[in-house]
Image (tube, grey):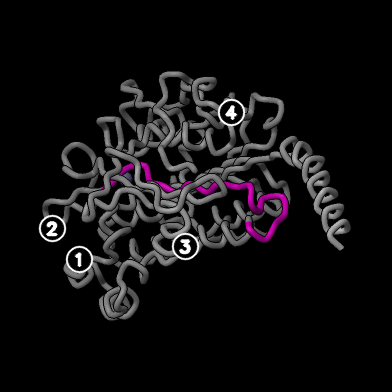
């Protein structure tokens, strides 16, 4: 009996020794990066603001909003159940300034193009002073990955805002499906998109971006997917707090759907890191400051950053203020790559890994 047991143990040890190098060679780490445009940390960590939600000038649908976001005992979970639940518990959710957290942009512009450039290149570019900046001369980490043989043709972007065609320009070779013109004309998603109301000419509704993102995950299974939602920012600029809240909750559901899909697919399960963040915050001072961002809206440099995945340590709390310029390096580290090979000037990875 003892002999059999020893032999079995030896056989298992040998099997493990043989299996280990094969498993190591088989590492195929993957990444899904998500941004929710201009969603402030205050709503992410506190839930709906009772004063704004009850203000006639900001909220038309006050009874519905009360029922959805103010009456529930946990206002934070009512607004973003996935981000503040599973992601915060099994991963990290940084930037809760009510509880000693901090996350901020490094650029001094506090609007979209500079923010997305910082997220995707790992450093601010002072030359970017407008959302109409045009084609991005900087190489994003998505473009850099797409130039590597093991990632070529396996990096994709689905974005609501059409400016992503310029932030990650055609030169990059990255497949970018952005704005109302994104996705072409064939198939059911394109047909629905063509016939939908265009609330904003430069940004399609996030439900379409989600449909394209899900199609990418199911059909082409890219190693790296970047999904950029927009509605939270545009509804805020429109002064529609009720619509901004619903957009945030829908986006939280979209991210949960992405994560569920990844976990149900052997191509992604157990080897995919999800990073979720925002390009900028919103003003925090005057009663209507939440509608705005930029240096004239103090507080709108504050952001939040979430991550979950096989290498992320649950509840990790980096020392100091997490910077938007660290997201590129964090994404590359999650893929097993060194940021120095991409750009030694980029911010260092966030200290959130095991
Ligand atoms: Zn904006």
C-alpha gap between disc 2 and disc 3: 32 Å
Q: Do tag 4 and tag 2 residues touch (Cβ < 8 Å)? A: no
Q: Do tag 1 and tag 4 residues touch (Cβ < 8 Å)? A: no
Q: Earlier in the sequence, mark 3 or mark 4?
A: 3
Residue positioned 72% across, 50% down in the render? 267
Residue 208 quadrant: bottom right
Q: Is residue 9 shown above or below 51?
A: above
Q: Do tag 1 and tag 2 residues touch (Cβ < 8 Å)? A: yes
Q: Secondary structure at mark 2?
A: loop
C-alpha gap between disc 1 and disc 2: 8 Å
Q: Earlier in the sequence, mark 4 or mark 2?
A: 4
Mark 4: is the Cβ under 8 angstroms from ligand 1? no
Q: Which residue is mark 4?
A: 170
Q: Secondary structure at mark 4?
A: helix
Residue positioned 16% across, 39% down in the render? 296
Q: Which residue is mark 1?
A: 52
C-alpha gap between disc 3 and disc 1: 27 Å
C-alpha gap between disc 4 and disc 2: 41 Å
Q: Tell me residue 243's x, y (percent).
A: 34, 65
Q: Which residue is mark 2?
A: 287
Q: Earlier in the sequence, mark 1 or mark 2?
A: 1
The foreground one among 131 and 274 is 274
The foreground one among 87 and 184 is 87
Q: Earlier in the sequence, mark 2 or mark 3?
A: 3
> Which of the numbered marks, if any, corresponds to residue 86?
3
Residue 350 quadrant: top left
């Amino acid at each position: 009996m003892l002999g059999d047991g020893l032999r079995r143990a030896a056989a298992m040890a040998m099997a493990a020794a043989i299996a280990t190098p094969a498993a190591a060679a088989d590492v195929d780490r993957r990444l899904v990066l998500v941004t929710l445009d201009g969603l402030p940390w205050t709503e992410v960590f506190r839930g709906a603001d009772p004063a704004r939600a009850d203000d006639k000038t900001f909220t038309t649908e006050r009874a519905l909003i009360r029922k959805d976001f103010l009456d529930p005992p946990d206002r934070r979970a009512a607004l973003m159940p996935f981000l503040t639940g599973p992601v915060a518990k099994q991963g990290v959710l940084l930037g809760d300034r009510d509880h000693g957290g901090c996350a901020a942009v490094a650029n001094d512009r506090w609007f979209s193009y500079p923010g997305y450039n910082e997220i995707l290149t790992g450093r601010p570019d002072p030359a970017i002073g407008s959302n109409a900046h045009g084609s991005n001369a900087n190489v994003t980490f998505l473009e850099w990955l797409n130039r590597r043989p093991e990632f070529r043709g396996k990096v994709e972007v689905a974005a609501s805002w059409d400016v992503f065609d310029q932030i990650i320009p055609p030169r990059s070779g990255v497949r970018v499906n952005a704005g109302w013109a994104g996705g072409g004309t064939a198939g059911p998603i394109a047909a629905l998109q063509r016939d939908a109301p265009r609330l904003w000419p430069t940004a399609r509704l996030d439900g379409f971006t989600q449909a394209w993102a899900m199609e990418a995950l199911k059909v082409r299974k890219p190693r790296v997917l970047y999904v950029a939602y927009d509605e939270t920012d545009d509804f805020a600029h429109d002064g529609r707090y009720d619509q901004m809240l619903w957009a945030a909750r829908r986006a939280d559901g979209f991210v949960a759907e992405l994560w569920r899909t990844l976990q149900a697919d052997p191509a992604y399960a157990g080897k995919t890191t999800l990073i979720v963040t925002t390009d900028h915050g919103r003003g925090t001072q005057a009663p209507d400051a939440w509608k705005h961002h930029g240096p004239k809206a103090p507080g709108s440099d504050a952001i939040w950053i979430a991550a979950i995945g096989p290498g992320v340590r649950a509840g990790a709390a980096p020392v100091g203020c997490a910077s938007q310029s660290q997201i590129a390096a964090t994404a590359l580290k999650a893929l097993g790559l060194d940021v120095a090979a991409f750009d030694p000037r980029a911010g260092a990875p966030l200290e959130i890994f095991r």
